[in-house]
Amino acid sequence: MQPARALHVIFCWHMHQPDYRGADGRYILPWTYLHACKDYADMVAHLEENPLARAVFNFVPTLIEQLEDYTEQFRSGQFRDDLLAALAADDLKTLTPAARHNLLHQCFRLDREHMLNPFPDYRRLHDLYQHIQSDVQEMADYLSVQYLADLVMWYHLAWTGETVRRGSPFIQAMLAKGRGFTREDRQQLLQLLGDLIHNLIPRYRRLAEAGRIELSTTPYDHPIGPLLIDFGAARESLPDCPLPHSKGYPGGAVRARWHVDRALAAHRQRFGCTPGGQWPAEGGVSEAFVRVLGEAGIGWTATGEGVLAHSLRTAADDEPARERWQYLYRAYRLPSGGPALFFRDDALSDAIGFDYQKWFGHDAVGDFVHRLEEIWRHTEGQDTPVVSIILDGENAWEYYPYNGYYFLSELYKVLSNHPHIHLCTFSDYLAHHDGQPETLPHLVAGSWVYGNFSTWIGDGAKNRAWDLLCAAKQAVDQRLTRFDPAQRERILRQLGVCEGSDWFWWFGDYNPAEAVRDFDDLYRSNLRKLYGLIGMPAPRTLDTPISQGGAPAAAAGTMRRTTP
């Protein structure tokens, strides 16, 4: 039963992977299916196991599209992902030298402390790899087929979720076996992973239909909507932000609405209902973009705490900031109407994303609950205070022991039974507190990272990437009407992929060089494919890398702390 004066707590887990397919439809990177087998499976299992828990799961359409593609690959046995092809291979002797080298390179791309070191047999494979690294191109050819078989098995075992391991006698037997894996072992693991991915989205849908979770979406290819509409939005929070040479993204407002509408249609197709809200890509909002959401009938949206602080400071003419509890823990709405606006508690969200991975699970839960209780006490003047905790649903757990199992299971249990805390969803909160949102006089454009858009625009490499995209969009606009409807759809779909936020996220020297190279190559490949679809040669500038990267980063660069 909900307490008389509850602190409403909303967890919004953002499930997102960019489109990792190259121009030929093959997967350049395997992160979609690996996170599905580890994190997306674990996250739904925690809610299945706790009938009292509530949460929002935000699925980006391009993620679901890829999961469906992987389901078809498992069904047909025709794998367009090199890792799965190796796992499925009847005879690993037939692998080309390039494929062998790729396995060696890929199968140690994980957090070694939590996903490799706990397994002595896997660690042994890594020690052998370290020994030959002085001349890996030559020495790798001396590794046996059994080494490769054990390696590809261990990599996939390491990328299974903790709930998956606990529920599968087969995986437990494989972990105990440790080495000497057979073709039959690989085939059985392949079958298990295929069933897991096939059943994943239906599991979330069942929970949503039972009213135990809310499912929301993001504009289709995860673009930064405010920047599509107006590059100048970047200067609302960073007045001196350097902008691309292009004055703006051609037809950006139309493209922003295209992504919003396409996401709504995709959600209805997969889940049988219209979502109540959209988490905009990277929490990127502006007044113009919020109007787009409102015109599409979106009931709620959300962004970062820094955006609210900037907005209130601007509205109050730079008066001294109030205490967070005086403004953060409520819903807002712009004077013009539109969706309700929720704002992320950055400190609590970052604690889960970056800090608690180093704690014992029980201690982390105790600290988190204590901080919520402090908010409850400070907001005693509010009838319905609400705390929004929003972060990636996959990237943090790799750095937790046991994929965050003990932390998450205890967290849901404690909060769902707490006398003063009520777990709910955004739509439930609005339905039970009609008319509650306060008026926010003005919204300063920004994102959940630093409250601005510096992660996606302003750096020299990021701006070059925008200029390349603007040039491609102009070429599309000049030629689109020449094609029949089916080809136009293919062109616009490919354009959407190029408009995604992830390419701009990775450009910059503060990201790991390997990840920057991967995304740089894939971005330019996607642009080249777009030019090919409109019958134009790709400009030579697409042959030159945009960024080099080079710096190590927390969580391998996949997440950012809210404040620099």
Image: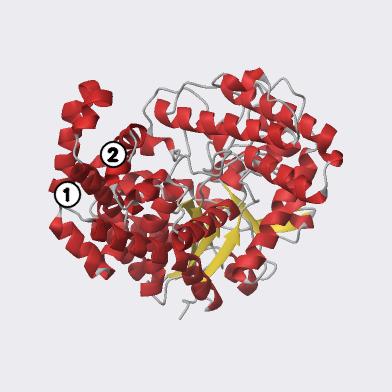
Residue 393 as seen in the image, left or right of residue 502: left
Is disc 1 placed on a helix, strand or loop? loop
Image quadrant for the N terminus? bottom left
In the rendered image of this protein, does residue 36 appear above or below residue 235? below
Q: How many labels does the image show?
A: 2
Residue 473 lies, in percent from the top left, at 75, 33
Residue 194, picture quadrant: bottom left
Confirm whether residue 287 shows in the render: no
Residue 342, picture quadrant: bottom right
Residue 376 lies, in percent from the top left, at 45, 62
**Viewer-nearest residue: 445 or 117:** 117
**Viewer-nearest residue: 542 or 312:** 542
Q: Coloring scheme of the render? A: secondary structure
**Viewer-nearest residue: 376 or 80:** 80
Confirm whether residue 356 shows in the render: yes
Residue 552 as seen in the image, left or right of residue 272: left
Query: Are there few (<14), some (14-19), or many (20+) residues within 10 Å of tag 1?
Result: some
Kind of residue sitting beneath label 1: Phe
In the rendered image of this protein, does residue 382 appear above or below residue 89? below
Residue 552, picture quadrant: top left
**Dot label at residue 119:** 1
Report if the CB atoms under discs 1 and 2 are less than 8 Å apart. Answer: no
Is disc 2 placed on a helix, strand or loop? loop
Query: Are there few (<14), some (14-19), or many (20+) residues within 10 Å of tag 2?
Result: many
Task: Give the residue at mark 2.
Answer: 108
